[in-house]
Amino acid sequence: MTQATDATTLVGRGNNDGARLFREWFEGLGAAADAGRPSAYVFVMGSLCELLRVFDLPVVFPEINSLQTAVRRVAHEYLNEAEDYGYSPDICGYVKADVATQLRGGQLPMGKIPKPSIAVYTNACNTYIKWAEIWERMYKIPVVTIDIPGTRTEGGQTWPGDPDFENDRKYVEAQLRELIPMLEQVSGVKFDIDRLREAMGHANTLGRGWKRVLELNRSRPSLFNALTDGTIYLGVANGFRGAPEGAAYFTELVEEMAYKAANGIGTLTDEQYRLVFVGVPCYPIFRRFSEMFTELGGTFVTSTYLHFASGGANLGYEYDLARPIESLAEGVLIGVRDAMDSMFHQTRLIVSQIDDFAVDGVVFHPIKSCRTVSTGLADSRRALLAARDVPSLFIESDMMDRRVVSEAQLKNRIDAFFEGLASRRAQAGSRPAAD
Ligand code: SF4
């Protein structure tokens, strides 16, 4: 193929295929809702999709559904409905949008979602546990918390072979073994370890691809915008984990990114500043938020979001299919623990991103309605500035609630940040060489 043909077929394929997969996924959920089929409600940090697929349970990710209401600019209707019902304006906006969705019989702008038959989740965010209790009350369904031991001290992770790690792994494994008969009961499908192996094989391919895609964005110019394109890839990484479509998607995405890297095709035609994004995106003005950076030559080469919101899939951990349940426990422990570290001990991660991606600036984005990710970001910023001499911006808004998103205020702060980046670069250029 000629370069032009390759460019026509390859560049942008990941975004197009991601959108198509999402449409198909929602069509499937709509069909399950109409047929009254059982479904599993899960969250992105430790979804256990590999295991749930063995039981033919359609997976519903309420976080993804909620953020989609914000991207489609109707979140305020859902938030108001939940607040009128009695939920506080202060709590996680995703929860409130989901409550309103349930009150509407599962109706969302993208289609209809089935009611839950079971909820399976981890302790990665404390909101998960209280959120699932809402479904427990509404639908009288079993809710299962898989308790994942976190990192005890920053940098103090243990790994396979270490007695502490093995104790934690056994603890997770015992919980997974208890979950299996519950899933059999809810779904009416018998557990089949070979189907689990198959799903885990697909998850291995997906994880390998996701890790590689993230690494390839070290290219200069960078190949995708972590905030916009990256969120599409992230959605596929979560929704299609353990599915053949997810494995194929990431194999092809690596191909697209490798092609762009080899041919110097960047996400911006004139990349000036390479940035890291810390926190959860501003979904109510999703495109515009990103444009306020790209219009000034800045692009997000990576983010903490692509790490924690993929439940640790960024690590590319590969399951050992010869011992599926033990290895599933190991992978879930390593992945979810990494996701928690990317939220709670993120300074190490950001420092490594600054070094690996040749970063010019870091944007901290604490938001009103996600305390889990936002609490402590001011301290993280201070710790980062002690570790690296890097310009940083601290801007506050929300991931769901447009009432606390002031575009004009954000723009002022972002413009000033870029002025600082430009003058820093000019000073560096005029500074005499050290030797
Ligand atoms: S991590 Fe934040 S946005 Fe996600 S469920 Fe927890 S509180 Fe809500």
Image (tube, rainbow, N blue to C red):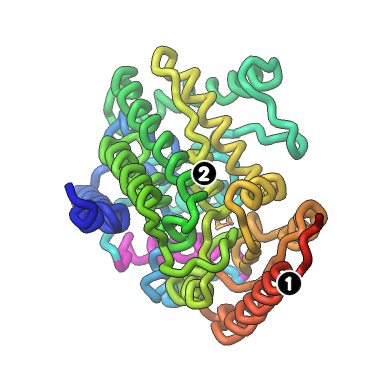
Residue at the image position 62 percent from the left and 84 percent from the top: 412
Q: What's under tag 1, amino acid-wise?
A: Ser
Which percent across, then down, holds residue 155?
74, 36
Q: Residue 213: x percent and y percent?
A: 43, 45
Where is residue 165, by image quadrant? Answer: top right
The mark closer to the camera, 2 or 1, is: 1
The yes-or-no answer for disc 2 within 8 Å of ligand 1 is: yes
Q: Is residue 151 above or below residue 8?
A: above
Nearest to N terminus: mark 2 or mark 1: 2
Residue 287 visible: yes
Does residue 81 show up? no
- Inspect the magenta stretch and tell me whether residue 209 lies in it: no
Q: Is residue 37 left or right of residue 322?
A: left
Is 215 in front, or is 46?
215
Q: Is residue 205 above or below residue 391?
A: above
SS of the residue under disc 2? loop
Q: Which residue is mark 2?
A: 45
Residue 23 placement: quadrant: bottom left
| Residue 107 on the magenta span | yes
Which quadrant of the picture is home to ligand 1? bottom right
Q: Identify the mark at residue 430; answer none if there is no mark.
A: 1
Image coords of residue 140 (percent x, y): 43, 45
Tell me which segment is drawn in magenta.
90-109
Q: Which residue is drawn at the image coordinates 63% and 69% (left, top)?
A: 368
